[in-house]
Amino acid sequence: MEYVDGETLKDLIDREKIISNHDIVDYSIQIAQALNQAHSSNIIHRDIKPQNILMDKYGLLKVTDFGIARVSTNATITYTSSILGTVHYISPEQAKGKFVDEKSDLYSLGVVMYEMATGKVPFDADNSVGIAVMHIQDEPESPIKLNENLSPRLNDIIMKLLEKDPQKKI
């Protein structure tokens, strides 16, 4: 494994609170490229979150912790009733214990982008079950309402990534 001299994206968000539009785009592209590489090898990460994204001193990101990743093939992916991933970042289908594919990672990317844009996750509650239910049932508040400096186009991309129906995601 490669050593990354830097910090996690979560550390940056905690320190800066809100990330600039330019940096959200830059970081999101880097994360999406890493996911595309994994997905092209039929690997689903299933735990995309800022704590699993390392940033070096040059602003280059590395997606880490493929510990619960799974090879995505018709033969190996099964439906399960267990929830894997960190509850603030799981997709609705993960929260339901249903089939997980590339679009689940994209939903989690949307949550990460939301957090970069607002300093907050879209759903929070007193317990994990409450958060999971919110991922399934609730619509997130538009991030532009929490950050008036957020570009409308970036807001639209984040909201599209947070679409509940996997068939309607980007």
Image: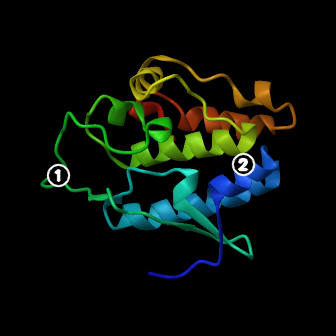
Residue on which the image places disc 2: 14
Crowding at mark 2 (Cα within 10 Å: few <14, some 14-19, many 20+): some
Label 1 residue SS: loop
Q: Position of residue 51 (x, y in %)?
A: 55, 55
Q: Residue at x 52, y 50 (%)?
A: 49
Badge 1: few (under 14), some or many (20 or more) residues near its Cα, within 10 Å? few
- Answer with left or right where residue 86 lies relative to residue 55: left
Q: Nearer the viewer, mark 2 or mark 1?
A: 2
Whether residue 47 is situated above or below residue 149 in the rendered picture: below
Please identify the residue farthest to the bottom as the structure is shown.
2
Q: Nearer the viewer, residue 110 or 169?
A: 110
How has the structure been colored for display?
A: rainbow
Image height check: is 26 above or below 56? Answer: above
At x 38% / y 45%, what residue is drawn?
85
Disc nearer the start of the sequence (2/1): 2
Q: Quadrant of the N terminus?
A: bottom left
